[in-house]
Amino acid sequence: MIKMDENFDIEERYIPELRKPAYMLIGIPDAGLVGEIVTEFLISKGIVEEFGQIFSRKYLPPILHVDDGVAKSPLRLYYGKGINLIVLHAWTALPANAAYPLAKLVTDYASRYGIQEIISITGLPVPNRLDLEKPSAYWIANSKDMAESLNGLSNVQKFAQGYISGPYAPILYESSKTKIRNLAIVVESFLDIPDPEASAVALEIISSYLGFKVDVSGLLQEAEEIRSRIRGLMEQTKKELPSYSSGKPMSYA
C-alpha cells in the first residue's frame, strides 16, 4: 500500500513497465460521461488491465464497485502495456470537494512514474446535440508551448475562448504547476444523457494521437446498451454537476 498523502492510499498489484514517452488517461464521470465511456470501453475490450486501486475515507463516497463477485474501490488504475498507457477510471460519480485533492493525486502519481503527458476527455454540452450527425471536438492545453505543438492536430479544433469546469479543470491547473503536459479533449455532447457517440469521436482522436488502433464501431453499435447500463451512473453524476459548475455549463465557448 502506497500512502500518497494524508488523503489517499494506493494499492498496486505490480509496477507498470512504462517506456518514454508515457501517458496517463483520465476517465471521470461528468457531462455526457464522455471520458468515462472511453476508458470503460478500453477496459471492456481488454486493451488495458487493472493493476491498482485508490482509497480515500475523506474524498470517496461510501460505495464499493463489485467486479466478478469481488468488492473493490470505485476508483481504479489500469495499464495498457501495448500502448504504454496508465488509465485512471472512476466507476462512480465523485463529489465536487474531491476535485482538487484528486487532481493533486493525479499529478503526484504521474510524477512518480515519469509520465510526460496526462490526457483528459470531457463533454461540451450543446443545446442542439440531437441535430448533430457527428459532434465536433476541441483541444485545450495547459501551457503555451503545448498549445503551439497541437495546432496541427487532425480532426480536432482549438478551444479558443470560454470556460471549463468540473473535475478536469483542476487537473489542468495542477499539471501546469508540475510541468506535466495535459491535453484535454472536449467533445460536443449531451449534458445529462450518456453520449457514446461523443465518446467514439474522442476515442478516434486519442488512438490516433497515441498511435494505436481501436475499432470504435463496437462502441457505436452498443450505444443504446451502454446508455441503459450506465443510466444510474448518469443520475449520480447529475447530482454533482451543479456543485462543479456553479450555475455555468461544464464547458462552454
Image (cartoon, helix red, strand yellow):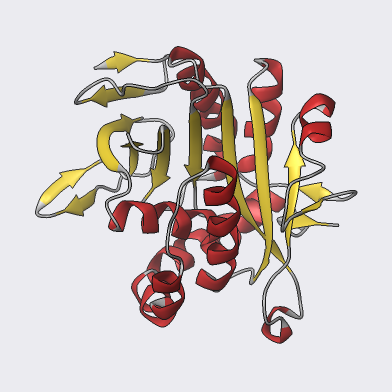
Q: Percent x, y for residue 235?
A: 47, 68
The residue nearer to you, when weighing 212 against 92, is 212
Q: Percent x, y for residue 76?
A: 33, 39
Q: Percent x, y for residue 188?
A: 70, 66
Q: Is residue 194 visible?
A: no
Whether residue 8 is situated above or below residue 205 in the rendered picture: above
Q: Quadrant of residue 178?
A: top right
Question: Residue at the spot x=56%, y=55% of the render?
Answer: 240
Question: Residue at the spot x=70%, y=28% of the render?
Answer: 173
Question: Residue at the spot x=67%, y=84% of the render?
Answer: 130
Whether residue 195 is situated above or below residue 8 in the rendered picture: below
Quadrant where the C terminus sits is bottom right
Q: Is residue 11 left or right of residue 126?
A: left
* Total numbered badges shown on the rendered structure: 0
Residue placed farthest to the bottom in the image? 131
Q: Quadrant of residue 209?
A: top right
The residue nearer to you, when weighing 242 against 189, is 189
The residue nearer to you, when weighing 48 against 57, is 48
Q: Is residue 150 visible?
A: yes
Residue placed farthest to the right in the image? 161
Quadrant where the N terminus sits is top left
Q: Is residue 176 left or right of residue 236?
A: right
The residue nearer to you, when weighing 224 against 240, is 224
Question: Residue at the spot x=25%, y=24% of the render?
Answer: 11
Residue placed farthest to the left in the image? 69
Q: Is residue 27 left or right of residue 12?
A: right
Q: Is residue 34 left or right of residue 216?
A: right
Q: Percent x, y for residue 53?
A: 28, 33
